[in-house]
Image (cartoon, rainbow, N blue to C red):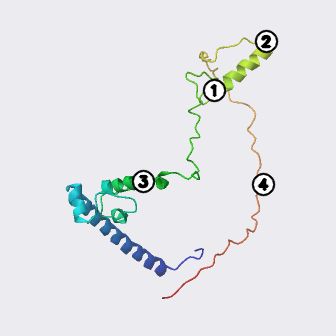
Amino acid sequence: MTQPRDFWSRRKAAVQAEAQAEIVAAEEQALAAQHAELEEKSDAEILAEFNLPDPDQLQAGDDVSGFMAKAVPDRLRRRALRRLWRLNPVLANVDGLVDYGEDYTDAACVIENIQTAYQVGKGMLAHVEALAAQEDDSAPIEDPDTPEPEAEPEPVDTLPEEPVQMAEVEEVEETDLPPAPRRMKFEFEG
């Protein structure tokens, strides 16, 4: 919808969205009240009320669609699904096409109490500096774990005499952008 709609079209759509939101809120409130009522009842009473079989007594080929209704509490739905998965191992078996089904972490390869030169926020900087100091042979090798003494800042009495030079920026000419792609819009009556 790349074309802007006029005020009345937007207003009509907003009123319809509000009405739809009120309907959904009323349905959710009624469902929550029904669930609160069912929480007080035992599983046997709920199963008798909805004319459902005992989920633990389901057999292969039994219909479990009655347990999928919104009014049925989650605990009964889960019991029925667990029984269904136990009865039919094909449903419980992952087909291998799941992208993240494998454990791709290196937790199995981790060695306990491993020591690395990596420091959080600094990376491998201390290790690289130590290698550079070894190559130089003139600088002693310092332990990266020891804190360096803080140097006192020198007092600045005067400002620099040279003026600060600013770089000049050329004005960029505006270029003609290609028009935004249009999308086809279909309206059906009836």
Q: Residue at x 34, y 71 (%)?
A: 22
Circle 4/circle 1 CB separation < 8 Å:
no
Sequence-first disc among 3 and 1: 3
Secondary structure of the residue carrying numbered label 1: loop
Sequence-first disc among 4 and 3: 3
Please name which of the two marks, 3 or 2, marks the residue nearer to the observer: 3
Q: Residue at x 76, y 34 (%)?
A: 162
Please name which of the two marks, 2 or 1, marks the residue nearer to the observer: 1
Position of residue 12 in the picture relative to residue 122 (left or right): left
Secondary structure of the residue carrying numbered label 4: loop
Amino acid identity at mark 2: Asp
Q: How far separated are the C-alphas under marks 4 and 2?
A: 49 Å
Q: Which residue is denoted by mark 2 in the rendering?
A: 137
Amino acid identity at mark 1: Tyr
Q: Which residue is denoted by mark 4 in the rendering?
A: 170
Sequence-first disc among 4 and 1: 1
Tell me if residue 49 comes above or below residue 109 in the rendering: below
Secondary structure of the residue carrying numbered label 2: loop
Q: Which residue is denoted by mark 3 in the rendering?
A: 85
Judging depth in this view, the residue of 121 and 87 nearest the camera is 87
Q: Which residue is denoted by mark 1 in the rendering?
A: 118
Sequence-first disc among 4 and 2: 2
**Which quadrant of the figure has residue 140?**
top right
**Which quadrant of the figure has residue 144?**
top right
Q: Is residue 168 visible?
A: yes
Badge 1 density bin: few <14, some 14–19, many ≥20, Cα 10 Å: few
Amino acid identity at mark 3: Trp
